[in-house]
Amino acid sequence: MTAARLIELWRGGMRESTHLGHVVIADANGIVEAWGNPGAVIYPRSSCKMIQALPLVESGAADQAGLGSEHLALACASHSGGRIHTERVAAWLSGLGLDDSDLRCGAHLPADPAERKRLVCSDESPCQVHNNCSGKHAGFLTLKRHMNAGPEYVEIDHPVQRAVRRAFEEVTGEVATGWGIDGCSAPNFACTVEGLAHAMAGFAQPAAGKRGQAQRRLVEAMLAHPELVAGEGRACTELMRAMDGRAAVKTGAEAVFVGILPERGLGVALKIADGGTRGAEAAITALMVHLGLLEEAHPVVQKYLTAPLRNWRGLATGELRRAEGFPS
């Protein structure tokens, strides 16, 4: 099966571009709806951070370290590197007796405008806590300490990553077909779009037991702190706020997006084939409207899907549209 037409860009009455991709909506019994190829193998990238955080909670490491919901939200985050994020991650590390040098994610300028301006104007270099994955890595370090394991926690054969792989394969219901190195230097395991949606359905309707309790805590943390999961002006934060706690959504690099809908028991996974963020944000928004989580007239729907595209003079130049048949 080939990728499906999902989102189109129209300009001057002509379809100028098309975002192709794969989408699966699943519940505990399997696929509910799908577009494209459910069996397409992808790297989930940062969309699966709640899976990567499962061993942190399941092992008891989170409770041993006294982590609260803000910490768990940051463990699932691709944050903007604002002070609201970096100060919390730095305090988390300090509480473990660690500091920035113990991270293995690398440093980059933050996306947060205020913090980026502060660093540039002060000629101060960013630290690793500014990395959008520093919360996930603080979680890895917490688990590493709990395991009394070595410092190189991003290595594929490290106990932390072995635990992550076990959790990943269990919740996707698949043996990882391979792995690559993510932007933050941690391994990222491959799965199908269907497997990723199946995992999200498990988070939406957790089973009894330690695994289910961990899944529920992580989703509740994301819903309670959408500003920590991404940041102001970011799609994940704005979409979750707009849905009033009814669904958690999380993006990943190369145009992956997932959704967790607890009240419906549904999991959503999508991958835009061209890797374009515009297409992924429009597609997840369209799906949330389709599933009754957002009204068509909501400002966040207009921002990511239906508002006219404007040039630097403010002139309307085009529009995004759902491709025919998406969603059905």
Image (tube, rainbow, N blue to C red):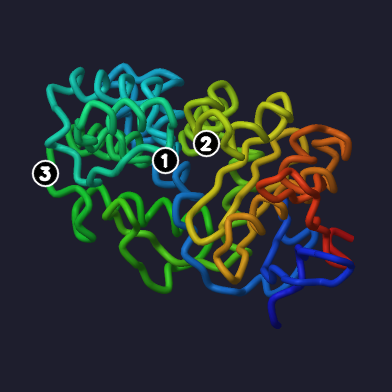
Q: Which mark is residue 224?
A: none
Discs 1, 3 touching: Cβ within 8 Å: no
* Foreground of the two, 41 or 254: 254
For marks 2 and 1, give the CA distance: 7 Å
Q: Earlier in the sequence, mark 2 or mark 1?
A: 1
Residue identified by numbered label 3:
151
Give x and y (percent) for residue 99.
Answer: 14, 28
Sort mark 2 into few (<14), some (14-19) or many (20+) by Cα contacts within 10 Å. Answer: many
Picture quadrant of residue 179: bottom left
- Residue that appears at 51% across and 50% down: 47
- Residue that appears at 73% across and 56% down: 25
Mark 2 falls on what kind of element?
helix
Q: Which mark is residue 54?
A: 1
Q: Is residue 152 above or below residue 14?
A: above
Q: Earlier in the sequence, mark 1 or mark 3?
A: 1
For marks 1 and 3, give the CA distance: 20 Å
For this view, does 9 lie left or right of residue 215? right
Eye-nearest disc, 1 or 3? 3
For this view, does 205 lie left or right of residue 141? right
Sort mark 3 into few (<14), some (14-19) or many (20+) by Cα contacts within 10 Å. Answer: some
For this view, does 163 lie left or right of residue 45? left
Q: Which mark is residue 215?
A: 2
Q: Amino acid at mark 3?
A: Pro
Eye-nearest disc, 2 or 3? 3
Mark 3 falls on what kind of element?
loop
Discs 2, 3 touching: Cβ within 8 Å: no
Discs 2, 1 touching: Cβ within 8 Å: yes
- Residue that appears at 19% across and 31% down: 124
